Image (spheres, rainbow, N blue to C red):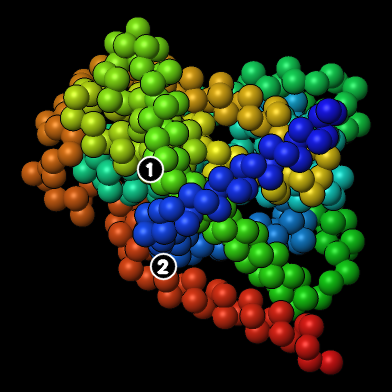
Amino acid sequence: MNRSIIKTLALAFIATVFAASLIAFPQQAFDASIRGLTMWWEIVFPSLLPFFIISEMLIGFGVVTFIGVLLEPFMQPLFRVPGVGGFVWAMGMASGYPSGAKLTARLRIEGQLSKIEAERLVSFTNSSNPLFIFGAVSVGFFHNPKLGVIFALSHYAGNLCVGLLMRWHGSTSGDNSISKRSSMSIKEALRALHRTRLKEKRPFGKLLGDAVISSIQTLLMIGGFIILFSVLNKLLYHTNITGFLAEGLKSLLLILGFPEKLSIPFISGLFEITLGSQMTSQVAEASLMQQAIITSFILAFSGFSVQAQVASILAETDIRFLPFFTARLVHGCLAGIFTMLIWKPIYEGEKFNDYPANTLPVMNLGQSSWLTEIYEMMTTIGPLITILGISIYVWLYWKRHFIK
């Protein structure tokens, strides 16, 4: 029996088991589906849509090329990627995953990145955004705004280290033949911006419409993955598959000095970061530092849900998924290590632990961080933005395909 037949049988078996699980646990699957939809509806769609649209516009107008020329002396020596990678990195950190993958794939399609450069870039430009780290995780799950500082420092420092490590991925011959500038050149950057703008033949209205349609199509795909993996994670738990996998992890956790109760939240976090982080914050047997280390790993690994979104985006190009997956494992380990190293000097040193996890602090949460305020606002107005965005998408799609 060849490998192709085995793969076919395995996929058919998995799909059948998944369908049977949906029939066996309809209420649990429905609740998980609503939970995933709510996350996408309130937070993911309204927070990512502006970044996606603006990114498409900036690429079309040549601003990304302009930034690329300016950042060439910085990005090439450190990460062995063209200067445009600096724009992708910044947008990835600001908007969160999978923005880095979407922008990397777009630049690869346009020929601004070689295959190897794209694989290096996508490995460290997909990260959690500050809004999710501070709003959802530190405040929403741990009720501890100051814990977000630990998560953010370990997360972004780990991502930076991944980028430095991935510079050794691939050979120099796989790089684009781009001049390695030793200094910034405003004049050359302006020339590159003008040349790119002239190459863009679409009028402004067409460019804007394409940006909206492309962005919303990507967000609809992301929403499908979020709902799917939310349901999958719940079904794995109720079919005791999560518990079975956790049994093999308990010994390792005990060796590391972690309570075995963290095993199930950790396995859940490997599939979906939101549920994994929430379950980790509820393990009373673990210390706050142990909870933070596990949560940092989950945020950096980003879960199979996000990785499936990235794999779907990269499938449109020749960018391989394996380097990205390897980078996520490395990022998870580094984020956990950084959390352990900075815990005492930063968290305990700054007296951030005046209140334990899972209890509301005496201080007013509204004064803790503007990111927290934005997150709370997004949960209120997010659905309205989502409805407006989808309505515009339907109107544009109808106008282009049905009105002659």
> What residue appears at the point 30 percent right and 59 percent down from the top-left corner?
376
Count residues near mark 1 (Cα–Cα under 10 Å), then give few for <14, some for 14-19, many for 20+.
some
Residue farthest along the bottom direction in this orientation: 404
> What residue appears at the point 35 percent right and 7 percent down from the top-left corner?
255
Task: Name the spot of residue 52 as percent of width and height, x first.
Answer: 62, 59
Residue 318 in sight in this render: yes
* Residue 287, quarter of the rendered image: top left
Q: Which residue is mark 2?
A: 382
Q: Are marks 2 and 1 in contact (CB under 8 Å)?
A: no
The foreground one among 26 and 358 is 26
On screen, residue 12 versus residue 203, left or right, reads left
Q: Marks 2 and 1, Cα distance to the nearest angstrom?
A: 31 Å
The foreground one among 300 and 241 is 241
Question: Of marks 2 and 1, which one's residue comes earlier in the chain?
Answer: 1
Task: Name the spot of residue 2 as percent of width and height, x first.
Answer: 85, 28
Mark carried by residue 279: none
Residue 330, above or below 94: above
On screen, residue 20 versus residue 361, left or right, reads right
Residue 289 in sight in this render: no
Mark carried by residue 238: 1
Q: Which residue type carries mark 1?
A: His
Residue farthest along the top direction in this orientation: 255
On screen, residue 141 versus residue 104, left or right, reads left
On screen, residue 278 versus residue 93, left or right, reads left
Residue farthest along the left direction in this orientation: 362
Task: Name the spot of residue 236 as percent of width and height, x first.
Answer: 45, 40
> What residue appears at the point 18 percent right and 30 percent down from the top-left corner?
284
